[in-house]
Amino acid sequence: MSRPNPSYEGSRRQKFMQWLKGEYDPSEGKLETTEPDTSLFTDSEYHEIHLYLRNEYADNEEHFRRGVRKHLTRIQKLYRLMAVITAIFMTVLLLWAVSYEPSYGDPNAPENNEVATRYIEHGLAETGAINIVAGMILDYRAFDTFGESCVLFVALCCVLILLRVDADEEAGSHAREAMFDRHFEPKNDIILQRMCRVLVPAIVIFGIYVVLNGHLSPGGGFSGGAIIGTGLILYLTAFGFANTERFMTEKVARLFSVAALTFYCFAKSYSFYTGANHLPSVISTGTPGAILSAGLIVYLNICVGIVVACTMYSFYVLFRKGGY
Amino acid sequence: MSLIQNFPFFTIILSMFSGIISFILNGKAAKWLHLLMTAAVLVMSLVTLNWCMVNNVSYTFMMGHFPAPWGNEIRVGTLEALMAVFFALLMLLSVLGGIANLDRDVQDSKKNLFYSMLDLLMASLLALIYTNDLFTAYVFIEICTLTACGLIMIQKSGRNYVSAIRYMIMSQIGSGLFLIGLSMLYSVTGHLLMTPASEALAQLAKSGSFDVPLEVILILMTVGLAVKSGLYPFHTWIPDSYGYTTPTSSAILSSLVSKGYIFLLIKLFYRTLDFNGLENGKLLDILFVLGIVGMIMGSVDAIREDNLRRMTAYSSVAQIGYIFMGIGLGTTAGVEAALFHMVSHGAMKALLFVCIPDLVDVSGGRADRAGLTGAARRNRFAGFAFTVGAMSMVGIPLLTGFVSKYLFAAAATGALRTKMLTAWIALAISTTLNCVYFLRVVLAIYTPAPEKEALAEGAAHSPVERTAMAGLIALNFALGVASPPVVWAIRSGLSMFS
């Protein structure tokens, strides 16, 4: 028996149910709204964007279908079957192999040998870094880490080749990229801007802290650089290119990356050269725990941090509009 | 430690530094820097090679203040120095040989990035050659992969993007397998440097523990590097990647990049994974069979291909098959032949890839056989260069291809009887197939085509490119006529490995 409840009409519960169904909007008529800024684009520009997108999409779709007809449909079933078989085979093979490996945390495992022992027992005395991991990657095995920074650098070069819109590109592509950027990206969002005023300085300062304390506490160039990069990206999202261009142009990013890598290259070359030739080196480990200690590690962390931050920021801007 | 012993380290750091600094130079300066860097690497590697051969020793070089099991290390011997010399030489000649095409194919604003990539590729190849540390090898494999991708997509076209993506995916699978194998190896040996790891492995082999993981590690590392170098069933990325990009990139990819991985594999077999112990396992047999299949199937695919550059790319599949067949023979002589073929294939393929665009240019941009008719009459020098390269690939005496085939056939006599016969038959079949597809192109380009004479106007006359081509032709003849010192260097270098 369902008797209509006279007090239901207009009650909070009824409004809530209506809101859930999407029939009622509590903010309707109470909120100041602004119409989208139509002055940004003229009608013809809008038309152009839509035409371009439609053509692009239709073109790709057509090509894709043609390619599928030509190459894939014939062998698709076999392909799926083989993919599943390969995946199962690899999974079983790896699990089978891993089941024979020494178990995790086993004190008698082969990796607990003289290498790890020396890192743990003499790491502080030999490198001056309280964070043993920083000592390992930036002193014992610094050549590998230089290689890793270069991997990031190469990745940046590849993305630049693919996405950077240069002056000698086909005419109009610059303008089109900028137009798309205005079309798709948030613009002057008050909530985002207010939050960013609080968050961005905190994020960037925290990133700098993580980089500078890389030899004292967990963290270091890679993680700290990623934090700084995130902060910059957030700032750009909130305030737009007009504001970031005041301090972060392509030239700045380029000079910073190159300067950091060059310093890394020279500093470590000196260290490798003196080490291999058994020459005295001017680099001392300093007082463990002080901010300027652990020889080169703190400077190398700064270099890695700069490279990572610049690379992350550059990736974001290149994917967004193909330039800084 | 004498100054000369520092040279390998200098070459690696110098090429990395040039790569970094090219980022802020303009295209022209970056080009000069690259050429100077490669020349310097060549000279320093020659001095190192001479030092190693005179003193007949190999040595390790600490990268830092910490000795072997704790810090990074590189290892230098005759074989490494020899490979460095050839890699630097081929890099220099490939870049010079395609330099006019480069100016045309690569956007002006992105030239410095291209040279930056080439510098870092040189650094990664040198590091792959010299490294004595497995993780360093992995890091530089990554750099090598990414730079190779950049080389493919530097010329803007949809095909290059697609083939770069394909190359990326296949290569990343290879790197991934290698990395999994590497981490498993670390967990059973506790070492990342090759020398201590091989000692630990010898202990494990004696005690018989961890047999299963060791087998899986061997499979993962070998398959990973085989995928990256394009052994037969994993070769599908080769024709597209080599076929459409700028000629310098094709030449470098086919003659250097894949060879770097194979050299690393040989080094792993000898310095870590106990090559002589491998003979008892099935792995070398599998490599042998795949190599044989690759030798034949690569040639068959090349016969079915009409586009000249793609045909040459398929022929690379066959040549990679030769190299793995040599390794799979399971004898030191087989590996020596494989190492010699790495060098000689580099010389032949660089020459072919560099001269093909000149032939295409005088044929109105057509790269099929019908379109190329008479091309050698319109551009005589490029036609001659192509003929030399093709003859060398087929294995005509006085050219380097003959010496490699002879070494393979001779090495097969020391192997098991079945392997010996299979290798000989496969060599015979593959050589015949080589003949079919290369000589029919040579015949086509020398067939008179009077109606196309007008196209000769488009002939490119770049003296630099011609000099580089002449250098590559001379290299083909030199390796064919004066091979004994190179073979001797390979032999003594290989004996220093163990």
Image (tube, coloured by chain):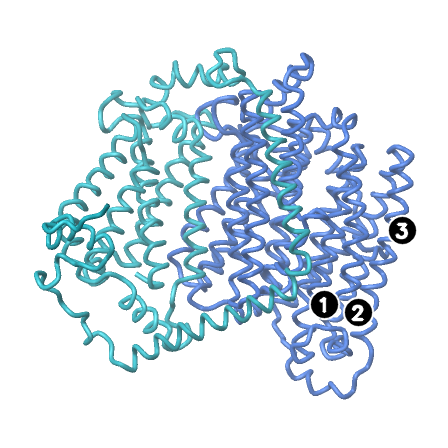
Chain colours: A cyan, B blue
On the same chain: label 1 and label 2?
A: yes
User: Neighbour class for label 2 at 10 Å: few (<14), some, many (≥20)?
Assistant: many
Instruction: Compare residues A91 and A224 and report the one nearer the observer.
Output: A91
Which residue is labeled 3 in the image?
B428
Instruction: Compare residues B38 and A179 and report the one nearer the observer.
Output: A179
Q: Quadrant of residue A28?
A: bottom left
**Above or below, B202 relative to B124:** above
User: Neighbour class for label 3 at 10 Å: few (<14), some, many (≥20)?
Assistant: some
Residue B70 position within the rendered picture, expressed as x and y whole percent measured from the top left: 48, 22
Residue depicted at x 33% and y 79%: A47
Q: Amino acid at mark 2?
A: Val
Asked if the residue at tag 2 contacts the one at tag 1, i.e. Cβ–Cβ closer than 8 Å, the answer is yes
Q: Amino acid at mark 3?
A: Ala
Instruction: Compare residues B58 and B275 and report the one nearer the observer.
Output: B275
The image's mark for residue B308 is 1
On the same chain: label 2 and label 3?
A: yes
Q: CA distance from mark 2 to mark 3?
A: 20 Å
Q: Amino acid at mark 1?
A: Leu
Disc 2 is placed on an element classified as helix
The image's mark for residue B441 is 2
Q: Tag 1, which chain?
A: B
Q: Earlier in the sequence, mark 2 or mark 3?
A: 3
Residue A307 position within the rendered picture, expressed as x and y whole percent measured from the top left: 34, 45
